[in-house]
Image: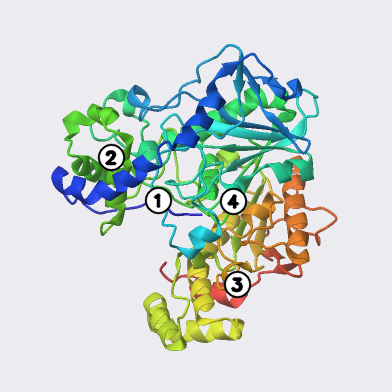
Amino acid sequence: MDFGNANSENDAPANGVKRRTFLKQASLVVAGVQASVMLPSAARNANAATTPSTQTGGRSAAAIVDTTSGKVRGTVVDGIRVFKGLPYGGTTAGKNRFIPPTKPASWTGIREATSFGHIAPQTTASGRIDYVKLIHWLDQPGGQSEDCLVLNVWTPGIKDNAKRPVLVSLHGGGFATGSGGAPGFNGHPLAKYGDVVVVTINHRLGCLGYLHLGDLGAPVEFAQSGVTGMLDCVAALEWVRDNIESFGGNPANVMVFGQSGGGAKTATLLSMPAARGLFHRAAIQSGPTLRLTTRENATRSAERFLAQIGLTKNRIRELQDVPFSMMVAAQDVLGAQTPPAGFAPVVDGSVIPRHPFDPTAPEVSADVPIIVSTTLDDAALGLTNFDLDDAGLRTFVKTVAADRADQVLSAYRKAYPKASPFLIQARILTDRGWRRAASTLVERKAALHRAPAYYYLFAWPSPGCGGKFGAVHGIDVGLTFHNYGDEFTGNSPEVRAIADKLASAWVAFAKTGNPNHPGLPEWPAYAPETRPTLIFDKETRVENDPLHDLRLLWEGMPT
């Protein structure tokens, strides 16, 4: 789910906006960020979660676990042990801003782990957008702070040597927004349903995680400033390796997965030498990332950022003293300019030595099985013209297909005779973007002839908002967690059956590297010759090369 500016490529020169102009433009943004930094209740919860204690307070001592930093106490909810806000790194504020993550400070006594930790500084999405409300994207508990390197664990048992598979979720929101504590990433249902350990994490985002200063003459300690958000993810996986056995998990059987921005992070980890061996399966849902930001483009964005803040290249170190609210405000202003400047991981040649899946799949993760997916109407998340008519659809198609507009429109009306113009528009945008990239990614993985890749299409429409969004971006997120029942998914027998099938596939894949289980038709590994695709819908089925004619329309056409 993407609500931040996470453009990976940007060739724009700096706009040279003066500091006074920036402050005027950004005042509302700063106010919004500051208002969400720490609400009083969030401050109390965070304090309670980090105060060492030797008192049990009537809570079960069975929820106490030793970590490499000290003892933590979680809660027991419906048989699942829940630990929230566990630090896997130190604060990223001040002198630690723009540098790789540090180890968390140790503590004595017992640290309470009953409340979500801080989320990374970010701009809040507009609550007026139907899609934002539908997926509860404003529900990001914990308050904003640069002391945000925390994770959450849900487990059926602790210190029991059960060696359960570990599923580590990377949250969506591009590389700019979100947190592992959002409702869609609740790990409790999956931990209980599948007898697995579920982990979600927070990490640095936006300019605080991906401002590439290394080619601007910055101090040497800033050399990896364009990749620190991804280094945070590696640090979280190292914490899992070193601690998860005490939480009933198997550090030698870890699956990393994510949707949208979380899928992009997963694809990036698959190309990082530092992540090798820290996970053993991976899933990329509606986040098929082939390429990241180049050093050249990232440097241009950094130059624009410095100008926006009002600093010169010889004053880069002063960025560590700028309030994070001003940093996020500068990012927001730049993201609204034409062309926008975005902040995402940089192919720096060292930490991230190559693009994740371009021109080929990465050899460093060739032995890691993967799942790749899209939804039928992924692109609907960014559309609001629900009253689009046939004339408007024709005009739209001309903008994306030029002299092939008639051919494209005819093909889509034939394929979807009952679909509204709005949904046909969404499917065109999805096919030429997300779906084409996902197909390329899974083909390149299969071409290595090492670990298998499995491909699925989620076609079951969300009932939310009267069903107007179709099978929209993110509809499968909660279902992988066996988490359903809100407006987004509903609580029908249909969705319960799909949740059983999808969550069981996740559990089977985490255990064995093969997602097949008795509730599914036989799901073959992807092969370019036949393109087998599992389709989750009212009738879950496998088809070879579904949407064949529509796929061929976009081959060779510009994106």
> Which of the two labelled residues, at mark 4 and mark 3, occupies the earlier sequence position?
4
Q: Which residue is mark 4?
A: 284
Residue at the far right: name it: 518
Which mark lies nearer to you, 4 or 3? 3
* Color theme of the render: rainbow
Assign a secondary structure to mark 3: helix
Q: Which residue is mark 1?
A: 6
Please state which amino acid type lies under the numbered disc 1: Ala
Which mark lies nearer to you, 4 or 1? 1
Badge 3 density bin: few <14, some 14–19, many ≥20, Cα 10 Å: few
493 or 407: nearer the viewer:
493
> Which of the two labelled residues, at mark 1 and mark 2, occupies the earlier sequence position?
1
How far apart are the alpha carbons under marks 2 and 3? 39 Å
How far apart are the alpha carbons under marks 1 and 3? 28 Å
State yes or no: discs 4 and 2 in contact (Cβ < 8 Å). Answer: no
Q: Which residue is mark 3?
A: 467
Please state which amino acid type lies under the numbered disc 2: Met
Badge 4 density bin: few <14, some 14–19, many ≥20, Cα 10 Å: many
Badge 2 density bin: few <14, some 14–19, many ≥20, Cα 10 Å: many
Please state which amino acid type lies under the numbered disc 4: Ile
> Which of the two labelled residues, at mark 2 and mark 3, occupies the earlier sequence position?
2
In this rendering, position of residue 519 left or right of residue 509: right
At which x and y percent is residue 319? 26, 31
Is residue 6 positioned above or below 510 on the image? below
- The quadrant where residue 313 appears: top left
Q: Which residue is mark 2?
A: 326
How far apart are the alpha carbons under marks 4 and 2? 33 Å
Assign a secondary structure to mark 2: helix
Residue lying at 23% horizontally and 28% vertically, measured from the top left = 318
Which mark lies nearer to you, 4 or 2? 2
The reply to whether residue 226 is visible in this rendering is no
